[in-house]
Amino acid sequence: MTPPNPTPNPARTVRRASAAALALAACLTATPATAVTAPRTTPRTTPEATAPGLDRYHRQHLAWGSCAIGPDDTTGHDLDKAGVQCADATVPLDYADPTGRTITVALSRLRATDTRHRIGAILLNNGGPGGTAVESPPHIREAMKGVGARYDIIGFDPRFVGRSTPLDCDWPTGMFFRSAGPDRAGFDRQIAFQKSLADKCRATNADVLPYVTTRNTARDMDVIRGALGERKISYLGYSYGSYLGTVYSQMFPGRYDRMVLDGVINPDDYGPLLLRDTVGENEQALVAWADWAAARHDTYRLGRTRTQVLATVDRVARAAARKPLTLGTGADTFRIDHTHVPLLLFMSLADDHDETRAELGETVSALSEAAKGHPAGLSPGFAEALRFILTGEGSQAGSVQTAIICGDRAAPRDPESYWQDIERDRAAHPLFAPMTDNILPCAFWDRPAEQPTRVDKDVPALLVAATGDPRTSYRGTLKLHAELPASRLVTVEGARRHGLYGEYGNACVDDRVNRYLATGKLPAEDLTCTK
């Protein structure tokens, strides 16, 4: 998961923070001899959350009240000021055992003000996996413009995320995604590192890990629908949230109304290896950024041409492979090695706005100075990112994100297959392939309790995507669109952006989504918007 970026838009922050969440793209194991133990409890499966004994969850009373949970809860106080109310929904840990252990899922609600023309409730998911959305209703109300007043806008933190019942594996990092580096010794160190993360999770949370899955989150969504008293619920999901929405539509047909999926993931592609399919898009995004930085050489001092800027990036990567780079001062002193440099670049490539490109310019400028042996100061945002990656500050976010994706789909187990992929792809993609092909904790995870969700029911959803999306490829969007003939697709041609509606400032996208949310009618045909 990428570290949070300070921006005035909390929903955008969450998605930027979780953009590399989908960077869980290459999980594997350490050695074939390393056995993966069975979970202490093997969950029984149920086709959907309508099994006997679930009525009490669907009919529960939600005690709406203040969102602030203490004097220092800035997010909660801001929500209170915006008129948002919060509550906790109780859900079973294991839906096959509804009388057993329970957990809570945190909710927020911004109620419809145009009650005469109220449409219903719309549920939000910002992606990740592991992203929060309790903070999002005010921003989404703003994005929805006039139609927002006709909805109860419901944010929720999925099970074990944010304000919901927590899961924390006590990791020394918030971001496990790393590059394997230039040689086999570096890859072997990654095997040991990733195995240690998986072992920590199993040692501290083995009793809940089998239930940290997208299918169980979809079941929680249906409990939320019932507890809200809604026969159907509308849905807006970004990135991983598009996958979650698709899963919900397959598990609970007939229980959703309007569905918007933005930054679309094809369910067949979703899993630990997802980002292997986006290396080309990320390299193209890096080249586009290099053109941008070259035009601003006087600011960032990285080179006056694309070639010179990319040469600076290569010099930084090579220097970090020889010796860790030192950045910052005092308590905020960090050592950056070859495993971190590709990730630091990757984190800022999911958005082609000037603001994000400037953040990457500052990052590469600081790394370039450190590579020369010069003192390199850090912006507050860069320091925050490094704390997230290099300390245990983000342990909970990284833990739950890993648990979800590893619990959803099994990863290859043999470390040698990862090394072979790295070596095969290194020549064509020297910077990013050792990262997207690298081994991750999923290689050491227990096998998922359920099979991945199959898409075998058509869904009249509105899909939104950019052709240059560096996180979820446009190719995957087209695949899902083909599997859902009743869906319609809004495309932004030429944008290198992950997540568009209400975020990118594209009136064509925003107007089309809002028209659908207002009328419930999909466009007669697909639509292409200009960047």
Image (cartoon, rainbow, N blue to C red):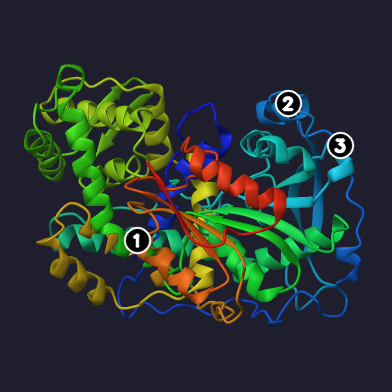
Mark linked to residue 77: 2
Of circles 1 and 2, the one toward us is: 1
- Report whether 115 appears left or right of 412: right
Find residue 112 and report its horizontal and vertical position in percent: 82, 40
User: How far apart are the alpha carbons under marks 1 and 2?
Assistant: 37 Å
Amino acid type shown at disc 3: Gly
Amino acid type shown at disc 1: Leu
Contact, mark 3 vs mark 1 (Cβ under 8 Å):
no
Residue occupying image coordinates x 23% and y 26%: 366
* Residue 167 visible in rendering: no
Splitting the image into 4 quarters, where does residue 150 fall?
top right
Q: Earlier in the sequence, mark 3 or mark 2?
A: 3
Find disc 3 in the rendering and name its residue.
65
Give the camera-side residue of 238 and 518: 518
Residue occupying image coordinates x 53% and y 26%: 8
Mark linked to residue 275: 1
Residue occupying image coordinates x 53% and y 48%: 397
Above or below 98: residue 519: above
User: How far apart are the alpha carbons under marks 3 and 2?
Assistant: 12 Å
Splitting the image into 4 quarters, where does residue 183 fall?
bottom left
Contact, mark 1 vs mark 2 (Cβ under 8 Å):
no
